[in-house]
Amino acid sequence: MTSPDGAPLSDAERRALREITQHLTRTDPDLLAGPRADSAGPAGRRRMGYVLAVACLAVSALALAAGALLALAVGFVVIAGTTVATTIGLRRASSRRPPDTP
């Protein structure tokens, strides 16, 4: 391990990092456990992102072919849908997080 400036960490710095890591894993055992069992994981989210992007592009192209006003309306619907989906995802993620303890 090295510090941000490239110098190797001292024994005291390594010990402090190890203690911090141990404390964090004691307070939240799932913190460093990787993706949760009910999560699609990074690869699944990335694949879903590609599918969503392609679907949005296809809908946008069809809407543009139909007319500018329709394309504008479809754009608003896509933005609203994305906002709702993101909000639901953030609420789910925060509900899984253990409460902060003093």
Image: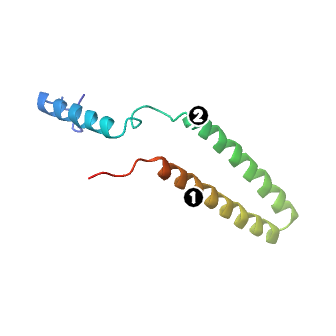
Q: Amino acid at mark 1?
A: Thr
Q: Which-is-in-front pick, marks 2 and 1? A: 1
Q: Which mark is residue 98?
A: none
87 relative to 19, above or below: below
Write the residue at 78% across / 65% down: 71
Could you tell me residue 37's position as x and y percent?
55, 33
Taking the image as shown, residue 5 lies to the left or right of residue 97, namely left
Q: Which residue is tagged 1?
A: 87
Residue picked out by circle 2: 43
> Foreground residue, 99 or 91?
99
Give the structural element (helix, strand or loop) at label 2. Answer: helix
Q: Quadrant location of residue 60?
A: bottom right
- The foreground one among 18 and 38 is 38
Residue drawn at 60 percent across, 39 percent down: 46
Specify which label sits upstream in the sequence, 2 or 1. Answer: 2
Percent across and percent down for residue 15 are: 17, 30
